[in-house]
Image (tube, grey):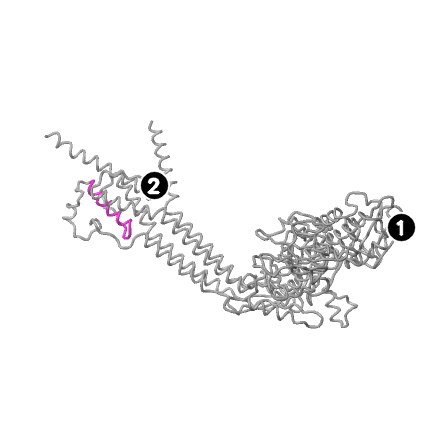
Amino acid sequence: MAASSSKRRHKVRRRADMSLLGGIRPPIAVLSALLLSLAGITALGLGRASQDSVPEAVLTSQQHFAEDGAITMRASIDESVTDLTRTAGLFSAGDPVSPDAVLDKIGSVYQKWTGTAVVEIESGRMLAARGENVPVTAVDTGKLAEKDGLSPRIVRLQNGESRLLAFALLSWPDRPQQLLIASNSLRFPGVSKGQFRSIAVVDTTGHILSRDGVAEPEQVKTAKQRADAKRSAKQLDSFAETAATKTKQHPLKAKEPGSGGFPGVSGSLRGNSVRGDRAVAGYAALAGPQPGEGTLATSLGLTVVAMVDVAEDPTRVAGPFFGLVSAAALLLIGALAVALLLGTVQRPLLKLFLESRRLTRGDLTRPVSVPRFGETARIGRALERLRRQLLGEPADGTAGAAGSTGSGPDRPGRRSRLGSRALIVISGVLLLAWSAPMLLLFNRADSTVAVPEQVVSDQRERTHTISDRVRRALNEGHADLVSVASLIGNRTSPDDMEKVLERTRTEHQRYRSIYVRAADGTVQARAGEKPHALPAGSKGKPLSQPITVLNESGKEPSVAGYAEIPGRNGAMVIGEFRIDFINALLKRPGLGQVRVVDSEHRIIGGNTGYLAFDSLPERLDELVSGTNQRVGMNAPAGAVVYRDGDGVQVAAASPFAGGGAAKQLRWTVVSWQPASGLAIPEYNLQNRTVLAGLLGVTAAVACLGWLYIVVVRPLRELAGKAESLADGDRRTVLFPHHHDEVGAVTRSLEIVRQQLQEQRKRDSAPLVGRN
């Protein structure tokens, strides 16, 4: 029985000790640990002895540039294969035509292939050819019937160059099946690389299939230029091998958490430094339009590498002094705040806890050691009064008052002016004195921030690439309409027209509606949505240009192209482009907001929310006007850095340049973004400083709020109850809300209350007997 009682007491004692882990110690301990960690982060993050000579913004820009090239190449390859397959299908659906007629029609509609040929599959005989020699001998016609036998492939020519071959079948009844072959180089259509950038296409082994921008040694004059050309070629080869290895990763494993935008594998690389210039590169694998969605082009396993030499910046935005001073100041202020909490909140409460347990054990000989401040002082004075009451003093304290000088700690009604809540506020003010300047004052980047020249140049070149991409997409759409119009001819029935139109709209998602309109304005065949209204009373050619905007107001611009059908007396094929198709071409990460504006600077499309036919901001309108000033044959793209009260902003504009039906639109693509969103050293330092301030505020609010909720608020409530108990309230039961120090003091007071009740019963029992 004694052993069982001893074991029970040990278990109760251990439970009481474990309960103290949830009291006043954890908030202060966590606050101390957080402040120490924040001091280390501040010293390391803000006090680095050096910084990268090439800003992260430049590396990120090269990555985005390579992604643009990969998207453009993937779209170009897929578009070429689709056009060839669709054209062959339209020829096969009609009457048989000669191979020469097929190639002539393809060459007149599409000027995208360097060479075309028609081969009889059974005999392997060349039937017709146009352009450069197509490497027909590299095609095994016996394997065309196998799975993926008609997929595009890359072949190597004898001169070391590579060609992309695309295939399609020409089939007519009672005729030998023919193979239509189109050959094209692996060049980048419409990618503006600037003056000093090199760009290459790499296969899965790291071998460069095509390159542009690197001069061959025999093309330069001086020995220095030849040495630079060899160095650049060697560096590009090194980048190509590294990029081919990195792009073999899974896209989700290759990307950093939180990064997005490009659905494939991409990144940036650093190269060697020569005479103050460091080679940097971006790489990107050809990826489908949606994550996990492959295309014919992505099956080729190609990677785009873009390389440029960037001048290194040896200066530093900040040295180690600021970070070290900030960390030292935080350690000093944090030590003062923690010492204040330990000395005025934790230590008095622990002392009060020990004193209350002493009274419950019956040790009443020594006076209660009363703390000096706050609620603990009030509870301590109440405990001293209760101790005297246990010794026989009346609850009103008259006996104690008679022998008191009037200034002792047991004097009822005296309250400390400085409570625990005020002490927590003082600790918070101390921590805020460090966090607030970090958050609002120190290392603020102003309008004098130096934006890297390469970032401004890349903004211009990427905007020009998007401008050319939109122009080419519209030209491709118009070429499709011309192809459909020429194949419809003057003998196709309306039912057959609808089949051709529906097939075209299905294969090319750029059209919302495509239809055949007769000269009198009636629609003879249609595929897709209901057409928009054309100009009233128009006959013949209802559109002033091959591609035009049909409306001048409304919620959505209606962009349409047309092609006249030969032999149908003014009938034409009209295709209305989806505005979402144009907007999708503008969605590229790292460019900020992008808009397409017409010749009157009204907004036609954008990558973010916009109002159709709205005007641009005034300074962007001036930029568009300036870039549309022709220099020579075309208006070159331009970029500018704006500095004003709203911060620093990088903007660029590029008018349509080049030929095709879309050139007559005179559209301009304009992009702009705040420099604060770029990884520029000044903004990085500002962001890290603000982050340190936010972490300081968060640590202070979390830990001090935790301390207030768990300790201070219950302690204030307990002080009032303890004083009521000392004043003679024996009916109110005291029960703890938490198993911590405050809860332990509450339990002790409850035991004292019960002892006082029993004492009163014992004192009143003899009186009842005498009566």
Q: Is residue 236 visible from the viewing direction of this image?
A: no
Q: Quadrant of the N terminus?
A: top left
Name the residue at 39% across, 40% down. Answer: 18
Q: Quadrant of the C terminus?
A: top left
From which residue to which does the magenta span run? 370-390
Residue 675 vs residue 524, the one in the foreground:
524
Residue 9 vs residue 751, the one in the foreground:
751
Residue 35 vs residue 126, the one in the foreground:
126
Q: Amino acid at mark 1?
A: Arg
Name the secondary structure under disc 2: loop
Q: Is residue 758 visible from the viewing direction of this image?
A: yes
Residue 324 spot, x, y in % from top left? 47, 62
Q: Amino acid at mark 2?
A: His
Answer with the quarter of the image where residue 128 lies. bottom right
CA separation in Å, label 1 and label 2: 95 Å
Q: Is residue 133 left or right of residue 361?
A: right
Q: Is residue 380 left or right of residue 188?
A: left
Residue 90 spot, x, y in % from top left? 78, 49
Q: Is residue 569 left or right of residue 426?
A: right
Mark whose residue sits in front, 1 or 2 = 1
| Numbered label attached to residue 125 | 1
Name the residue at 35% across, 42% down. Answer: 740
Residue 491 spot, x, y in % from top left? 80, 51
| Numbered label attached to residue 737 | 2
| 347 lies above or below 614 | above
Nearest to N terminus: mark 1 or mark 2: 1
Name the secondary structure under disc 1: loop
Q: Residues within 10 Å of mark 2 (few under 14, many from 20)?
A: few
Residue closest to the far left: 771
